[in-house]
Image (tube, helix red, strand yellow):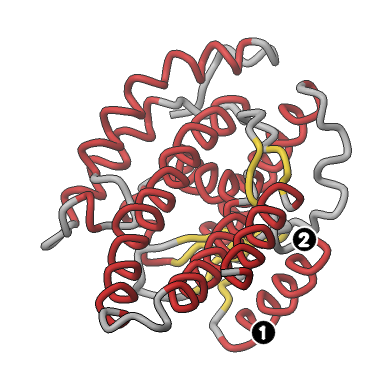
Amino acid sequence: MKLKKSFLILLLGAIVVACSTNPFTGKQTLALVPNSQILPMAFQQYSQFLSENKVVSNTADARMVTNVGQKIAAASKRYLDANGYAGYLSDYKWEYHLVDSKEVNAWCMPGGKIVVYTGILPITKDEAGLAAVMGHEVAHALANHGQQRMSADQLQQLGAVGVGVATANSKNAQIFNAAYGLGSNLGVMLPFSRSHETEADHIGLILMAIAGYDPSVAAELWQRMQAQEQGAPPEFLSTHPSSTTRIQNLRAWAPEARAEAKKFGVTNFIR
């Protein structure tokens, strides 16, 4: 009994102490793994990835990726500085690379390390469509979603240990452990991931608008993404919201993004 109580106290203490603030929502978020540990690891992994893949350079598409990335980075700084987070990006070392791959994807590591795959360019179609994708990916990094995910994974593992301790002497221990695994995934981890995707959609829309790109393009991009889908799982079984949900949200948020951009003097948008 004392062991169980001590475990719970330790778990609650870790959650209370290890928190940071999301600069876009003002909410407290999990931060069991500090950025001082995450960023060096991300930078090393990024360099390794580039050395093992075909980086496209000195082409119109590669220059577009760099140009859009720089605009999104500048928009991020403008927003953060204006909202009381000057210096938030001091540890960022922005890089933007186009990588030759048929995969329809793009990502941004913590610290501003961005990769866009050539396979997504036929869907983004143009600079504004690419800005929608890169704004979304940069938003994940700025909101520390990677840090939160790593922290949540650790808590899930700690929870599994707790269930194991609590049911060690039970005949149904295996059932309890299986139920915890299924329940924590469907009830916590997947919704957690979907909430990150929705948050990144919202933040990314604001960033692309401040960068001078028409936010209405984002919904159009996801219509094209939806047309590429084959056998997508139900939303509650997915790490991402459905394309239908995303399109509806992006359309609803576009006026807000334009209004936010107007605060920075941006009223004309690239389509």
- Identity of the residue furthest to the front in this view: 1
Compare marks 2 and 1 and give the one earlier in the sequence. 2
What amino acid is labelled 1 in the image? Gln
**In the displayed structure, does residue 102 sit left or right of residue 228?**
right
What amino acid is labelled 2 in the image? Pro
The residue under label 2 is 34
Task: Name the residue: 63% across, 79% down.
Answer: 50
Q: Quadrant of residue 261?
A: top right
Q: Position of residue 49 (x, y in %)?
A: 61, 81
Which mark identifies residue 48?
A: 1
Please say if the residues under marks 2 and 1 sit with CB atoms less than 8 Å apart: no
Which mark identifies residue 199?
A: none
- Please state, as top left, top right, bottom left or bottom right, where the C terminus lies in the image: top left
Q: Nearer the viewer, residue 205 or 177?
A: 177
Q: Nearer the viewer, residue 4 or 107?
A: 4
Task: Name the residue: 59% across, 48% down.
Answer: 138
Above or below — where is 67 with respect to 257? below
Numbered marks: total: 2
